[in-house]
Image (cartoon, helix red, strand yellow):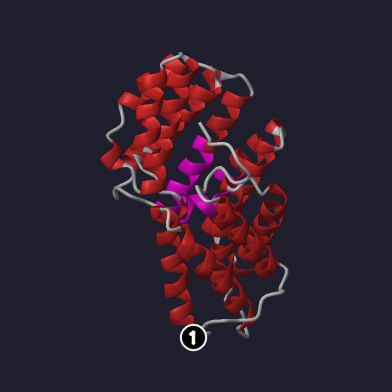
Amino acid sequence: MATTGTHPAVADPQLGELLVSRLRDATLGLSAPAGSDDPERLAAELDHAHRDYRTGGYASLAERLPRFLSTAHAVSPPDHLLLARGYLLTTRLLIKLDEQQLGWMAADRARQLAAACGNAVALAESSRQLAVLARKAGWHDQALTLTLTAADAPELRAAGAPGNALRGLLIQSAAYTAAWQGNPSGMRELTAEAAAIASDLTHGRQLLDLGGFNPATVQLHLVSAENSAGLPARDLAAAHAIDPATLPSNERRARLYTDIANAHHRQGHRDACITSLLAA
């Protein structure tokens, strides 16, 4: 359940507006570089921005991420992979802020940069973000094609554990789209495929900068998918199977509680809904 307002993912509307305006100017090349262009410092700055995102540090992120983009663009020659990662984070943030028009620009830029450096994981992730935007636009068939085509790419299959984890993220995204299409059986089949990939990975928390991928995150997507399919009872059953401590970030744990709140709201459970929102 999203709160009302211009930017549902950020509690302070003014902070949401500030984030969008700064990201817009940085994306359009209207912001002057404001940090060190040392490659190691730039990489550390992006890592810090990812931590801000995972922990909900939006005030810090409003300073750090636009500054990173402007400075990274000024480096000659530019680090295409580092910039691609920056634009992937930008896209995820803009999606949460419901700024789809600017999100399309950031996602397409991430895809071009990932293609330029030949990084299979970043390229597949750009397809996943484009699919999210397509789903939000109501283009469900295109969203499914983007995710499932990217998941079958030979380069991604050859990318080891990160590539397998990204395949899982793509397939669970496809499952969510299937739920929006009114295809719960297809959604559960795809979710089971993603869960099998997660269970086969030897590392517990893959792709933390992309939201994380492990059995708990697959189950979290199932919660959201059952909710989107209009089945709040199944949503709550799936949610109760998750230990929130196994989710990789504050952002993911908050998503769990808001999905639970939404399910309770649909069933008319006012007190349980409020409790879940407060937990989020």
Q: Position of residue 188 (x, y in %)?
A: 48, 23
Relative height, residue 157 to residue 141 (above, below): below
Residue 172 horizontal side relative to residue 147, left or right: left
Number of on-image labels: 1
Q: Which quadrant is the C terminus positioned in?
A: top left
Mark 1 sits on what residue? 38
Q: Secondary structure at mark 1?
A: loop
Say what amino acid the circle numbered 1 marks.
Asp
Residue 250 horizontal side relative to residue 36, left or right: left
Relative height, residue 39 to residue 154 (above, below): below
Q: Nearer the viewer, residue 224 or 219?
A: 224
Residue drawn at x 46%, y 14% as measured from the top left: 268
Q: Position of residue 191 (x, y in %)?
A: 46, 29
Can the viewer see residue 72 in this picture?
yes
Q: Position of residue 83 (x, y in %)?
A: 58, 69
Would you say the magenta stretch is mainly helix, strand or loop? helix
Mark 1 surroundings within 10 Å by alpha-carbon count, few (fewer than 14), some (14 through 19), many (20 or more): few
Q: Dividing the picture into quarters, in which one does residue 184 lie?
A: top right
Q: Nearer the viewer, residue 96 or 15?
A: 15
Q: Position of residue 119 (x, y in %)?
A: 55, 63
Stretch of the chain drawn in magenta: 150-172
Residue drawn at x 47%, y 20% as measured from the top left: 265
**Residue 168 falls within the magenta-colored stretch:** yes
Residue drawn at x 56%, y 74% as measured from the top left: 67
Residue 205 horizontal side relative to residue 133, left or right: left
Relative height, residue 246 to residue 210 (above, below): above
Residue drawn at x 53%, y 35% as measured from the top left: 2
Can the viewer see residue 115 in this picture?
no
